[in-house]
Amino acid sequence: MIRPMTRTALIAIALAACDAVPGNPRAPRPAHLDDAAEVARDLWSDEFGVDLPAPPPPIEWLAGDCLDVDAPGYACVRGWYAGGAIYLAARPAIADTLLAHEMLHWVLDQYGDSDGTHEAPAWRTALPDVEAAILAWELLQSETPR
């Protein structure tokens, strides 16, 4: 028989493993990453017809082509959503990251299930539109003098 305190500790360890964060070092943060996250939040709000919480989740910009996470079945993970935060492998352009994808995990998490198995219809119906909108937004940013 497992004692109540031991059972609680085992459950806490199991839950912590599910929300493991990548071990990559941080990379220099792009100047417009926070703006891109706000844009992505607004795009998803429009897509679902709801007001999502502000601000969007914290985003960590990490060095390396692949994130250092244990994700069985994936050779290279470029984005990760865990513990209410988003982790992205650094890329020259935000549109080349999985920002829209990981933000969809966050959006779905607001409804109680971040859908780690990617079964919700939004993965097929809405994600391509949001990714295209982020690309268009980023192209506009690069053409706008600062």
Image (cartoon, grey):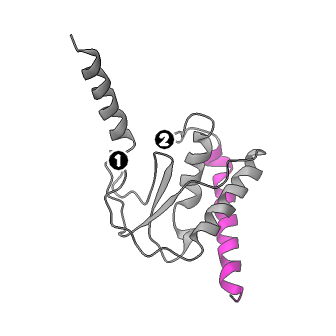
In the image, taking residue 74 as reference, residue 115 lies left or right, namely: right
In the image, taking residue 125 as reference, residue 86 lies left or right, namely: left
Mark 1 residue element: loop
What's the magenta region?
Answer: 122-145
Dot 2 crowding, Cα within 10 Å, few <14, some 14–19, many 20+? few
Instruction: Say whether residue 123 is magenta.
Output: yes
The foreground one among 99 and 110 is 110
Q: Residue 4: x, y in percent?
A: 29, 16
* Identity of the residue drawn at 70% across and 47% down: 52
Q: Which residue is mark 2?
A: 116
Instruction: Say whether residue 26 is magenta.
Output: no
* Identity of the residue drawn at 55% across and 46% down: 105
What is the three-letter code of the residue carrying label 2?
A: Gly
Report the quarter where the N terminus lies.
Answer: top left
Mark identifier at residue 71? 1
In the image, taking residue 86 as reference, residue 36 lies left or right, namely: right
The answer to whether residue 131 is above or below residue 84 is below
Q: Residue 135: x, y in percent?
A: 65, 70
* Identity of the residue drawn at 65% across and 74% down: 138
